[in-house]
Amino acid sequence: MASGELLRQFFRATAAGDATAIHAAAEAMVDEERAKNHNLLADDLDRILRNGKRAPATGSPWSHVDIPKDRERGFPLVDISSWDYPWERLVAPSSSLAELRSVADENARSDVLAAAGLAPRRRLLLVGPPGCGKTLAARCLASAVHAPLVVVRFDALISSYLGETSANLRRVFEFLGRDRFVALFDEFDAIGKERDNPTEHGELKRVVNAFLQLVDAYAGDSILIAATNHSQMLDSAIWRRFDTILRFDLPRPQDRVLMLRLFLRGFETTGVAVEGIAKSLQGASGADLEQIAQSSARAAVLDGRVRIRSSDLNSAVSAYRRRASALGGQA
């Protein structure tokens, strides 16, 4: 809890509407929590202060933006957020990480390419199992090019009205053409399925055709990212529309060690067999490892500790194995 004087400073600045003083007070609170060795809380507060977490819908920097909506139900077709994620947050195959950083550099220096009659890569397809970094990669790329992340909401995009799904897609692409965004079409197989599949009806085939046409015609500055856990379901014509295809697989043993240590940053782990535990978690995704780390951290924080005990981590791992077993997975 912040000291009384800092809280008074913060509330006085808020009452006066002094944005500079509010920010200074917030920074002082972060410093105070870090001085108390509340490092995880300090890191989270610092990310929020620097827009490292998704901005709330109410009073967000985009509350004034006229985002596209589904005409049938009035639902927003996209969510907009801002992230401050360094590349170090992403543990991914070195080749994929190098490609992502190259794409970021190309888009940051697009004027240099334009002078030579060239354009940066702006169409990426990310494939791989769930929880292996595809969404995180989009956040890191958005951070690197200093652009908002636009996540396309397929729950609102897909309509029961004939032709309305394709119309919603057009509204999304028109919106993306207004400014520079990093646009994430997550679970992309929902609209990119193979058109030759006899089990799919004609409306879905029209949606795939509409997407192909919109991608071909798109000439905006936004980076388009499609992510899928089921690449085998994608229409063959979809693959040719992307400049770069990146694979995100389950982390290797050494990757799991890096991830678990990253997720436990801010806590003491001396005497805990973090490396051995991480290597034993065969088949665990990055999301699984983060959940294990957070469970361990919660146990320590609620016990008033900044040191992770072996019992904290072992208990979290046991819970993960029970959950994986219940879901029919192997852990």
Image (spheres, rainbow, N blue to C red):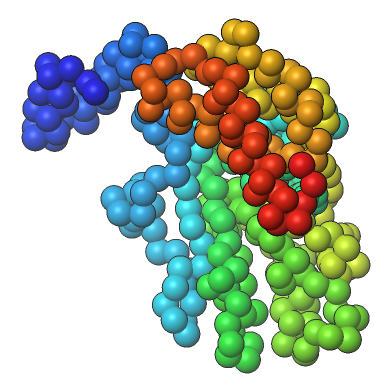
Nearer-the-camera pick, 326 or 58: 326
Locate residue 254: give its quadrant.
top right
Image spot of residue 267 (x, y percent):
51, 16
Residue 299, relative to residue 178: is it above or below?
above
Nearer-the-camera pick, 69 or 268: 268
- Is 330 displayed left or right of 150 in the figure? right
**Residue lying at 32% horizontally and 17% vertically, measured from the top left:** 33
| Count of numbered tags | 0
Residue 56, relative to residue 212: is it above or below?
above
Image spot of residue 183 (x, y percent):
61, 53
Residue 162, relative to residue 214: is it above or below?
below
**Residue lying at 75% horizontally and 66% vertically, measured from the top left:** 189
- Is 71 displayed left or right of 155 in the figure? left
Quadrant (top left, top right, bottom left, bottom right) of the C terminus: top right
Locate residue 29: give its quadrant.
top left
Image spot of residue 64 (x, y percent):
33, 57
Residue 117, relative to residue 326: is it above or below?
above
Locate residue 105: give its quadrant.
top right
